[in-house]
Amino acid sequence: MSLLTVSGSPHFHADSSVRKIMYGVLISLIPATLVSFYYFGLGAIIVTLTAVVSCLIFEFLIQKYMIKGPITIWDGSAIITGVLLAFNVPSNLPLWMVVVGSFVAIGMGKMTFGGLGKNPFNPALVGRVFMLISFPVEMTTWPKPEPLTTQIADVVTGPTALAFASFSPESIPSYQDMFIGNMAGSLGEISALALILGGIYMLVKRIITWHIPVSFIASVFVFTGIVWLVDPSANMDPVFHIITGGIMLGAIYMATDMVTSPMAPKGMLIFGVGCGVLTVVIRLWGAYPEGVSFAILIMNAFVPLIDRGFKPKRFGEEVKNG
Amino acid sequence: MKTFRIGGVHPPENKLSEKQAIEVLPLPEVATIPLSQHLGVPAVPVVKKGDSVKTGQLIAKGEAFISANIHSSVTGTVTKIDDVVDTSGYRKKAIIIKVEEDQWEEGIDTSDNIIKECNLSPEEIVEKVNEKGIVGMGGATFPSHVKLQVPKGKKADFLLINGVECEPCLTSDHRLMLEKAEQMMVGISIQMRALRVEEAIIGIENNKPDAIKHLRKLAENYKGVSVEPLKIKYPQGAEKQLIKALVNREVPSGKLPIEVGCVVHNVGTSLAVYEAVQKNKPLIDRVVTVTGKDLKKPSNFMVRIGTPALQLIDAAGGLPPNTGKVVNGGPMMGKALNDLESPIAKGTSGIIVFSDDESERVPMQNCIRCAKCISVCPMGLEPFFLGLISDKQRYEECEGNHIMDCMECGSCQYVCPSGRPLLDQVRIGKLNVGKMIRERG
Amino acid sequence: MNEVVLYSVLSIGGLGTLAAIILYFVAQRFKVIEDPRIDLVEEKLPAANCGGCGYAGCRNFAEGIVKSGSLDGFSCPPGGSDMMKDIAEVMGLEAEEKDPMIAVVRCSGSKQEAPPKTRFQGLNTCAFAHSLYAGQSGCPYGCLGEGDCVVSCSFDAMYMDENTNLPVIIDDKCVACGACVKACPRSIIEIRKKGKKDRRIFVSCINKEKGGIAKKSCKVACIGCSKCLKECKFEAIVVENNLAYIDFDKCTLCRKCVPVCPTNAIQEVNFPPKKNRKKEEEKSTEN
């Protein structure tokens, strides 16, 4: 018999691990990935693979040669960053830009702070915003969806629905198309339906809680609703706003990233509302047609403050007897 | 179904010995009776080396207010009063008795007759409970006579009986509720009498439907006693959580249950009170669950206090060769044994044998801020944060974040996907904050 | 255009002047007059802020000296007596010569001498291990080997020896600040006199249990047999609670106590290896 182990209680551990959570998120990403493969064809597959593989390689290189610590590339977090980064770019983006984006996401967004769990900003969004600012033309030229295409270069491009809204509202696709994903846009953001499916999976598996997505989407809906009621002729209705652009992707996957969101339920609600309001402000009055990434990054910066200010309700704090 | 509101987890129940009737374990060859088996001041020995003692004889007296008497659990000769390795490996004083043939102290009724009538006054009951050294049998081992006296200016509305047994693996309370229910009911009515309360509620988790049914039927004959099934959730057996679940009252932070008019006793304590008051029998034995995945015969034993743990494991089929850890108590709050010879005490509810791979902790990773620890903390604390600041020795901040509310249920560490030793860190914080508070006076 | 420049120069300049005047009066009103000697003393200090002096930092220490106006009770372990002389000069006082001190680990319960009987898992700090259990060897006084002392050392003067699982103090780097003494939950480390030519003799055990029990968990435990007490002619050894202690002020480093110890609990450091070799030879012939 080996020596008896002595340790503090508890002596049980739940069947949970970082890896399980991360692969759970990956499973929930499958529907949205399939939709993007369907509408953007080979280009989408190549961009996604490039992003994932380069994220893994950069994480490996940094852990092996710069940090010289344990290699944890298979915990799934780098894969998620890769997939989410790919979700945020058009399918015809030159591959070297994807690689640069991955490097920024993993290198600057995550590893500089100490790796998984220490990064204040969502790595995929850091990479995305870096690319958006560095390569504005390529990042905002979206191919039109064409089911199962194998063409990569010279695809027919077209503006997103949000861009349409600002110059020619009559060519906006139907809501049904937009909901399913038949519209121009970044890889992963097009299909609200697939994203919601993934979100429900994560809710059931208790990877995320409802607070952030619901408060995010609801605050976008309410805010744009007010603007729309004030002047229906100049503004789009709230339903349009929540099913276009990156709202669904942002609310379900980006804002709920555990590492960069608040931990107490109340804080999560504040965070979601903040993201929603900032998104709408940027969309309606900012220079960019889309503001989800900026809104989430800005709110990420507030997380430590929110965590400090909104503690969970303690047992025995307020006494209500009866 | 009723339960408490904030936090909680549901670990796998693993109640392997659920169906095993209580067996009486043979007497040990040597009984080691620790002088500190209860919360509070250790008892002072009243026997000396060479004395012969009878079963049930007083051998150490609890002289302080929060202390308890200790009685000999066997008949034999005191060979020495010496330091003995306790559960944690530190040496504590104990009385060691060489066991001879069992001979009970006079006046103790060892028959099986159930005496239902009790006409003692509350003061007499408390005196009897004090004299017979009854302590809380759930694991906290708080002297029961203290809990049976309502402080001046306070009033008890409810007596809550804890039959929850929310710890996985353990089945001793469950078996007691099935096999000694009648006696327990009398014990409950005696406790009600002592506290002058009209209503007693027995809380039982829903994974013990047979116990609920059995006790409900019996409760019909006892006025004011009712049985309440509860949703299965750990740590429902914790005093504050049980009160919240049963009568929806919240004990304020840092206060005792009597503050909200409740007194909580374990089912085992009720039985012990019955035996002390009606049968004159001191607390010298208890039911201990011996279980483990690789154990041949997980069982429930009626064991004399002072029996070495190894004897119980042997009776349950012997120590499996792949044993990695042996835990005294439940798997969530129990203590890992340093030495298998350490004796069963008044608060030992179970001996759990873990295999090598079960006793291995998950490798530690960075906190990924998943907030699972916050969502399961039954006290509404932020374990990850407390762990962090305790690690950085910022103890004032720990106090400000209510680290002392933590009852060490271990839910946070149980769910942590990064395998972080949250409770270990919080314990260090609590230790230092406690020191700080004491120094302040 | 000129007007714009003029107005901005005037308004910004005016604002600046106004702020300067306000600041001047505020500074006058809240002026703190400090003894200039505080800065002078602080300059001499090592600026390690180790806390070895008992003050929160070097600045506080300097303030303390200047305030009290004497050097009684003030000592800066890292600076040593040379530095105290400098400070005395600044203060216009006489510095008394103090013996150099060093931290000493009073436990020899290595993996070999005190074999582990259990395996520890959990938070790897001595503080936690101490609160959880007696220790792997079963000795409730012995070193837990998790290295809280090493973490606390701000002079890189300690490391954990992987073979023995005990901390080792590097003589040249240790400044006897006492941080490790505070960090050790079992008070194993003691600040002792560095000794002539860095030679020291000390009892490397603090186990107060009875001999037999102590011996059970560790082969090199002090069993309180008092043999050393009888050997010592200078009354430097006390045996209390089954434990011998050598007073470093009285010890003359004669080494008589070392060979009589039946458990080799008394350790000598930096002595010429003559006697040691003899002893080893004896051992090897025995084996």
Image (spheres, grey):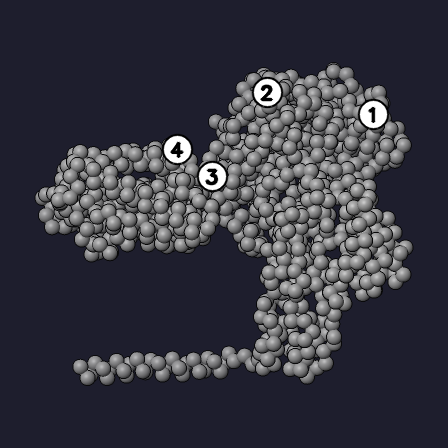
Label 1: state its secondary structure: strand
Chain letter of mark 4 equals: A
Residue at (66, 38) in percent of width and height: C118
Q: Are marks 4 and 2 in contact (CB under 8 Å)?
A: no
| Residue under pointer 2 | B18
- C-alpha span from label 4 to label 3: 14 Å
**Amino acid tagged 2:** Glu
Q: Which residue is mark 1?
A: B99
Residue A225 is left or right of residue A125, and the answer is left
> Alpha-carbon distance for marks 3 and 1?
49 Å
Are discs 2 and 3 both within one chain? Answer: yes
Residue at image location 70% in from the left, 63% down from the top:
C102
B13 or A17: nearer the eye?
A17
Q: CA distance from mark 4 to mark 1?
A: 56 Å
Please name the residue that numbered disc 3 is placed on: B417
x and y percent of residue A41 in the render? 19, 36
Residue B347 in view of the camera: yes
Between circles 4 and 3, the one closer to the viewer is 3
Label 2, label 3: how far apart the Cα atoms are: 30 Å
